[in-house]
């Protein structure tokens, strides 16, 4: 399999961290990709020119991190990232949705930083920051499990992206419970080895 990715992408990190947790990393070749220039090899598999994009062993292109991680989980592995049914499944899916929302807002803000400053842009950025802050408050009020599942991996990747891209807005200060959880969870091999570099 091949994974089109960018090392700074929190979505690509989520996919690769899941692959590591599942013990599938030896089956995946990482293909560094800049989706902003719409390379032909990416467009051939994903017309949206977005990463991550996984090419399966059958040559099928899968995109959107949620689709890719569910596919990887279906291959089996060391752990099961998607609980089968019941409250545990929906708790993990809800965490993933909350973490993906943080990533969406943070990546949106990051993209806006590159545009010329204007009132409309500043309003969008403020709205995205407020969404992240509210989500962090919710996460800080939860008792997050230390075990690997799609939700906890997604949360760790979202927090790592905030640390990378918004280090001037430290999220840890007002979120002691979340900080303590991340300090421990961040030591797990699939999270520690995928930590993005500045």
Image (cartoon, rainbow, N blue to C red):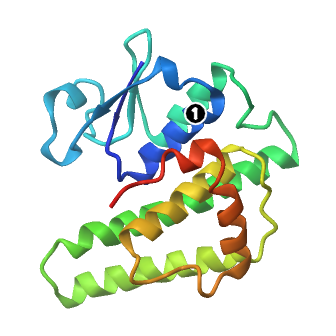
Residue 130 horizontal/vertical position (percent): 49, 83
Q: Nearer the viewer, residue 117 or 186?
A: 186
Please, is residue 1 above or below residue 189 in the view? above
Q: Is residue 64 visible?
A: yes
Q: Residue at x 39, y 17 (%)?
A: 60
Query: Number of labelled discs?
Result: 1
Please, is residue 58 above or below residue 175 in the view? above
Residue 159 horizontal/vertical position (percent): 54, 65
Residue 148 placement: quadrant: top right
Q: Is residue 148 left or right of residue 52?
A: right
Residue beneath label 1, please? Answer: 20
Q: Residue at x 43, y 61 (%)?
A: 104
Residue 185 horizontal/vertical position (percent): 69, 56
Image quarter in which the C terminus is found: bottom left
Q: Nearer the viewer, residue 163 or 48?
A: 163
Q: Residue at x 66, y 73 (%)?
A: 179
In the orientation shown, which residue stands out farthest toward the bottom? 119
Image quarter in which the N terminus is found: top left
Q: Is residue 123 left or right of residue 152?
A: left
Q: Is residue 47 left or right of residue 118?
A: right
Residue 126 placement: quadrant: bottom left
Q: Nearer the viewer, residue 112 or 120?
A: 112
Please, is residue 115 above or below residue 107 in the view? below
Q: Secondary structure at mark 1?
A: helix
Residue 167 horizontal/vertical position (percent): 41, 77
Q: Residue at x 18, y 71 (%)?
A: 114
């Amino acid at each position: 399999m091949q994974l089109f990715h960018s090392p700074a992408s929190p979505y690509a990190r989520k996919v690769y961290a899941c692959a590591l947790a599942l013990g599938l990393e030896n089956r995946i070749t990482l293909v560094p990709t800049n989706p902003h220039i719409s390379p032909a090899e990416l467009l051939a598999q994903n017309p949206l020119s977005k990463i991550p994009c996984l090419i399966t062993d059958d040559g099928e292109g899968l995109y959107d991190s949620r689709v890719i991680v569910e596919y990887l989980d279906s291959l089996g592995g060391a752990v099961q990232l998607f609980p089968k049914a019941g409250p545990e499944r929906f708790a993990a899916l809800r965490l993933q949705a909350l973490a993906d929302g943080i990533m969406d807002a943070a990546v949106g803000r990051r993209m806006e930083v590159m545009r010329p400053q204007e009132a409309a842009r500043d309003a969008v950025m403020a709205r995205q920051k407020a969404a992240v802050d509210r989500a962090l408050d919710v996460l800080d009020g939860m008792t997050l499990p230390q075990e690997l599942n799609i939700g906890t991996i997604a949360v760790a990747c979202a927090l790592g992206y905030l640390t990378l891209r918004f280090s001037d807005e430290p999220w840890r200060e007002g979120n002691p419970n979340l900080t303590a959880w991340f300090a421990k969870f961040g030591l797990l091999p699939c999270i520690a080895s995928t930590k993005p570099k500045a």
